[in-house]
Image (cartoon, rainbow, N blue to C red):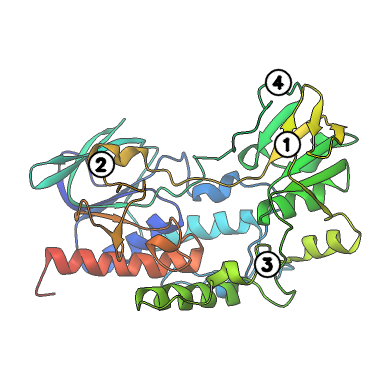
Amino acid sequence: MAEPDRIHDVVVVGGGQAGLAAGYFLRRSGLAYVILDAEERPGGSWQHYWDSLRLFSPAAHSPLPGWWMPEQEGEEYPTADHVVRYLTAYEERYALPVRRPVRVAAVRRAGRLLAVESDAGTWRARRVVSATGTWRAPYVPHCPGRDRFAGRQLHTVDYRRPDGFAGQRVLVVGGGNSAAQILAEVSEVADTVWATLRPPRFLPDDLDGRALFAVATRHVRARAAGADGDGGVAGLGDIVVVPAVRAARERGALKADPMFERLTETGAVWADGTARDFDAVLWCTGFRPVLDHLAPLDPRGPDGRIATEGTRSVAEPRLHLVGYGDWTGPASATIIGAGRAAKQAVAEITASLRPDA
């Protein structure tokens, strides 16, 4: 197992799907590398998702590089637990050098190297791949009265199953996939209201992750070539109609109200004066990239974003980013997309460290 007193060609920060994909290609490159993961066990963020979560694509269309995800018996769309088992087996299959739990606090410049500071010591590397994802940075928008509400407030990261809401009045906020999937099951045991900024847009029933990845790839390539593209996935809709969502829609549980104006001590008030009481608010309002560890490198531009060429940071060319979304590769926050982005990152790293490779 690699130790922090060595100089490594590459240190990968994050041992979820993107970090493992990077490890697969680094293993093939022959470069000296280590993967630092903050989790206690394999599986990345998948081990924290709600119990009923399903992939948007069948297993055969959700592979990491080198080894297809096995089918899950009785399930067209695999569960989060199945993905955890797959990632665990994948890590073992390729004997990837993952150190955990290692919590990286900062990446700093150290002359010709980068210093990766953690609670387990400081690793020095010629290149760093950041693959920390978004799960540890839940986003809740500003809302007047949010600190006054006396009921429970939870984010997607806090939700596991619906039974804790049985018989309650629950306000679900957000217009994406997590809101629709969680609402679908909470509405079976609770009195629910769904609040969205704009009317929810459901993808056609026959579209799933297979088509979404192809659309995202086509859109990013068009933008890279200077064309406007076709709007990408956002041009099709926001919500994949997995079986649970379809069933909830058919029983009328997915009727959305406009966004409320403010929260009160007992509930919410809408712009037209409508007031409703709630026992709980579920914020299904997304995430932000986990990038605090990169702050010492100051990689953000004037617009607050990290500009990249391929996966490489423009401000710090020794830094590569994988798995955060389309800006780090088409659909790179998905399992199959993370693999393709990781392949590009390792190719870029190999070319810079071994120009003759």
Label located before the other in sequence (1 or 4)? 4
Q: What residue type is labelled 1?
A: Glu
Instruction: Residue 120: give x, y in percent of width and height.
Output: 29, 32
Mark 3 surroundings: few (<14), some (14-19) or many (≥20) residues within 10 A: many
Which residue lies under the disc numbered 2? 298
Circles 3 and 2, Cβ within 8 Å, touching? The answer is: no
81 left or right of 15?
A: right
Measure the C-alpha gap from mark 3 to mark 1: 37 Å
Instruction: Residue 37: give x, y in percent of width and height.
Output: 39, 44
Front position in the image: 13 or 247: 247
Label located before the other in sequence (3 or 1)? 3
Label located before the other in sequence (2 or 4)? 4
Which residue lies under the disc numbered 3? 77
- In the rendered image, which quarter is residue 102 located in? top left
7 left or right of 92?
A: left
Q: Which amino acid does label 3 sit on?
A: Tyr
Q: How many marks?
A: 4
Measure the C-alpha gap from mark 1 to mark 4: 14 Å
Say whether residue 30 is visible.
Answer: no
Label located before the other in sequence (2 or 1)? 1
Mark 4 surroundings: few (<14), some (14-19) or many (≥20) residues within 10 A: few
Measure the C-alpha gap from mark 2 to mark 1: 36 Å
Q: What residue type is labelled 2?
A: Asp
Quick one: SS at disc 2? loop
Measure the C-alpha gap from mark 2 to mark 4: 36 Å
Which residue lies under the disc numbered 4? 148
202 left or right of 341?
A: right
Which residue lies under the disc numbered 1? 261
Circles 3 and 1, Cβ within 8 Å, touching? The answer is: no
Q: Quadrant of the C terminus?
A: bottom left
Name which residue lies at 78% across and 39% down: 271
